[in-house]
Image: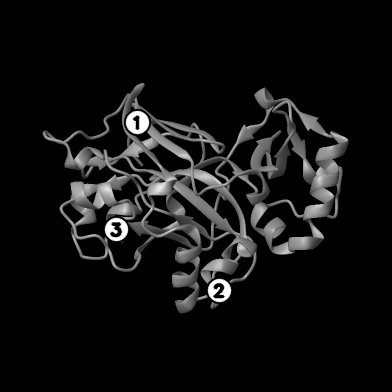
Amino acid sequence: MKLVTFTHDGVTRVGALSPAGEVIDLPAADPTLPLDLVSFLAAGDDAMPSALSAVERGEHLIPASEAHLEASVPRPGKVLAIGLNYRDHAEESGQEIPKRPVVFAKMPTCIVGPGHPIHRPRVSAAVDWEAELCFVIGRPARHVKAGDAAGYIAGYTCGNDISVRDWQFHSPTWMIGKSFDTHGPLGPWLVTPDEVDVSNLDIKLLVNGEVKQHSNTSQLIFGVGEIVEYLSTAFTLEPGDVVYTGTPAGVGGTRRPPEFLKAGDVVRVEIEGLGVLENPIIEEPLE
């Protein structure tokens, strides 16, 4: 199943895609279902059967042209990310291959959905792209072993870890340069684990139609299970938490000369089985 957060007639709620690409309004199909995706995921086994039934019935359909897709999870409780998690990206960055996951946080306010403009901030021109496989937690996870991690994941989606490179290295923690508003595109939908094997997916990023990154999730140094085990050893992962799993080689900052995003560009993430996440770049609006 492909779950979405969508806006229609000024109301934002959780839905699912029909086989024809229409949006099924899940709370309309079953008024007992929560309106937002995080609450839907937290409801767990109480919500999923009703959602599956609504998809099978094919009722309460909204044409794709009338439903505006938002970020898969518009306001996660936590947004975590793994750095240097593809060997070729670590090498192009001049870093040693990590012995354990390199974890940093992105602020939830950076999250935007497909088609939403990414702002080129007034304080920097060093705005870079990073195509990433992302996963979303479906139920509370603490001290979860890698082999059991699949049971805690609600689904997978495309992400773009937009990075302001000069601000990223203002401090050793990276967080400030990874968290500018609009710098966490996520979407277009959340694919449930039964529909995709994320251990071997083609991943690609294009700027204005030109391929900049092209790899496969089989090249991840730390897989999804290992990441869940490592994170949940330290703290509880909760429904709706988002994890960016890392980016492959081909980022702009390591090119010679460096290449950065500018107003007018269109950046596109494609992940096999998960869809396309495309966003335009604009100058940061004046307040």
Residue drawn 26% across and 40% down?
251
Q: Quadrant of the image for the N terminus?
A: top right
The answer to which quarter of the image holds residue 95 is bottom left
Residue drawn 42% across and 34% down?
117
Element class at badge 2? loop
Q: Residues within 10 Å of mark 3 (few under 14, many from 20)?
A: some
Counting residues from the N terminus, which is met first, the one under dot 2 or under dot 3? 2
The image position of residue 178, as x and y in percent, is 32, 53
> Which one is closest to the eye, mark 2 or mark 1?
2
Q: CA distance from mark 2 to mark 1?
A: 41 Å
Check disc 1 and give the amino acid type.
Ile
Counting residues from the N terminus, which is met first, the one under dot 2 or under dot 1? 2
Position above or below: 171 against 183: below
Residue 165 lies left or right of residue 274; in this view the side is: left
The image position of residue 271, as x and y in percent, is 48, 37
Residue 220 lies left or right of residue 32; in this view the side is: left
Q: Quadrant of the image for the C terminus?
A: top left
Residue drawn 51% across and 63% down?
225
For label 1, the residue is 282
Counting residues from the N terminus, which is met first, the one under dot 1 or under dot 3? 3
Q: CA distance from mark 1 to mark 3?
A: 20 Å
The reply to whether the C-beta atoms of the residues labelled 1 and 3 are less than 8 Å apart is no
The answer to which quarter of the image holds residue 4 is top right
Numbered label attached to residue 176: 3
Position above or below: 234 against 224: below
Q: Nearer the viewer, residue 264 or 24?
A: 24
Numbered label attached to residue 173: none
Q: Nearer the viewer, residue 98 or 24?
A: 98
The image position of residue 92, as x and y in percent, is 19, 46
For label 2, the residue is 144
Check disc 3 and give the amino acid type.
Ile
